[in-house]
Image (cartoon, rainbow, N blue to C red):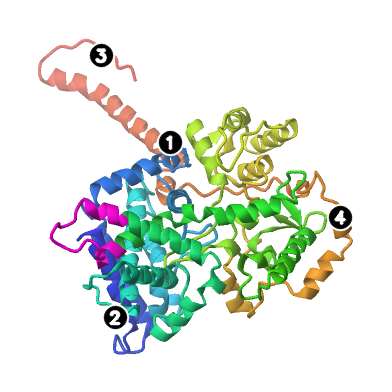
Amino acid sequence: MTLCRACLLFLTLLPVVSGKAFLGSDPHLKAKLVRQELEGVLAEVLGHGHGVDGARLAKIRESLAPIFRALPKNGQGRLSAPVMRYSVQRYFSQEHGWVVKGFEPHAIAANISDTTDSSQILQSKLPDYIRTALEEKFAHSGFSLEDLAVMVAALERLTFDEVIRGVEVAFKLNKHATTDGLNFKEFEHVLGSYLVTQMLEGTSEELTQHTMDKENIRELYPHWDATMLFVIDLAQNEVFGKMQRRNPFTDHAVYFFEDATRIGQRISDEFASWSSHECHEIKDKLIQFDVHGTGRVKLSQFYGKALTNKGMAVERGLTYSSAGEEWQFNEASSYLRDLGTLDESSTLQGPQVIIPNYISGMSNCITSAPYYSICCLNECDGVFQHLEAAISGSTASAAEIIHAVESMPDTSSIEATKVSAALRSRLEEVAAVHGGKVPLHGRLLAQWLHYVFPRDCPFPHLAGTFNPVTPVKYEEVLGAEATVASDEEVEQFLKSDAARHGPSPEAGAGMWNLKEHILESSTPSDRATSPLKQLLRTLSSLGLLAGLVGLLNQLLPQVLSISGRKTKSVEYDV
């Protein structure tokens, strides 16, 4: 069975599970059978050749190899499940700009039996089920580089099959059969429908509602016009691509289903890098207030920027619904806190927004496809890539890390820096916690990097102290407008004592702590072959050997004597 067929089978499970007649009304039995079917499919996917194109698998392995070398491993040189999740998360962030659902740092393993409506959660959590099933398969011994590549390939293929489904929906919404040939204008409308339903969380696949969604799309996504120019550019590039494979006897201005799927896949792959300018615009606006380069903006200034934008919008005659990006920086303080965006360590300064935490936070996700979201990139990934390339191993001395950081070339978003004496001392503190070697993927190094690159590397909060979710999910629980600061809240911060104090060059210093968190790298196979057990096994073997040698030393002369041969004394050096 090929991987494509496996993923298509996942999709065919959706209508089956949702059918009223399927296994009566027992949701737990439905969930159990779906899970069994999924595991059976995965078992075939993981068979000989993995059902994955060899060239694609080789490319994935090549991309994963640097981080695989640098990550902590178990006794067999393999990755544990938590480390595997981190590496998959990093891969999709770096390669596609995706946050794959079920692989977020804060994700909880899926449990299909936790809900009475398995059909509704199956599609949205399918990556989570793939992850969970593969984790169970490799739980004992861990993930090799090959296993890791298969996990990535399965998820990539899953997203491609979802592109196919999305394009089918787009054809239907525009009243075309998937066998129809389209002119460029019709083709453009199909791609627009694909964007709305697949990437921009269109509310319905019903034609009337979809038409309304498209008419009002600029309220949801102010960058719609620029995005459609990007899509049209991809379509026009497709024209040139078709010139190499076109039939000279057919109409070359006709577009088909296969053309739409190719462009849909390119939209998925390239949208994050294309739309990164939106994130840089947000960051640039906040940096204007970060006069000391601490990576922080006082919440009063944050809300003040929102009011400035609001005034500009009113001057331009824009209404609330059409102002679009002019209404940024108005998230409620409670929502910012749950996102892990606030620094509340200083009473004098009051709450401060941590720039990289805000930029890469869930409130700034640009689009959301069924299996992943496209959010602003974590620019610190580039720092980690450099460290992983410069340092061989999962730990390093403070001197090695400082040398690697100072030798890092400038990138488009991060400038190389000299490490101050104060920060050198901080890293020595971290090294002392670990007996001289700093784990490259522990919380304390991530914290130190935040202070080295305060505008680029997020501050790593302690686990369980924040709960990042998208605005839509947040408001589903707490009600409409729960993410938006009220006029009273804004006024409260603008008139606070903290607002009267200027920004401090020491902002953020109070957040430094030495509470470490390291991903568990061991697996049950390590515990089965622990050093103590290995030692006992070795001693036992040596004892058995000594006993055999002693027995042989006693018996050999007797045997030779019985055989009538004379022997000289034999000495054994054991």
Q: Secondary structure at mark 2?
A: helix
For label 3, the residue is 570
Query: Which of the marked residues, 4 or 2, is nearer the chain's N terminus?
Result: 2
Give the amino acid at mark 4.
Leu
Which of pointers 4 and 2 indicates the residue nearer the eye?
4
Q: Nearer the viewer, residue 73 or 421?
A: 421
* Residue 238 picture quarter: bottom left
The residue positioned 30% from the left and 80% from the top of the image is 175
For label 4, the residue is 348
Query: Which of the marked residues, 3 or 4, is nearer the chain's N terminus?
Result: 4
Which of pointers 3 and 2 indicates the residue nearer the eye?
2
Give the amino acid at mark 3.
Val
Residue furthest top in the image? 568
Q: Report if the CB atoms under discs 1 and 2 are less than 8 Å apart.
A: no
Give the amino acid at mark 1.
Leu
The residue positioned 21% from the left and 10% from the top of the image is 568
Query: Which of the marked residues, 1 or 3, is nearer the chain's N terminus?
Result: 1
For label 2, the residue is 16
**Left or right side of 409 for 429:** right
Residue extent of the magenta highlight: 238-260
Residue 101 in sight here: no
Q: Position of residue 410 (x, y in %)?
A: 57, 35
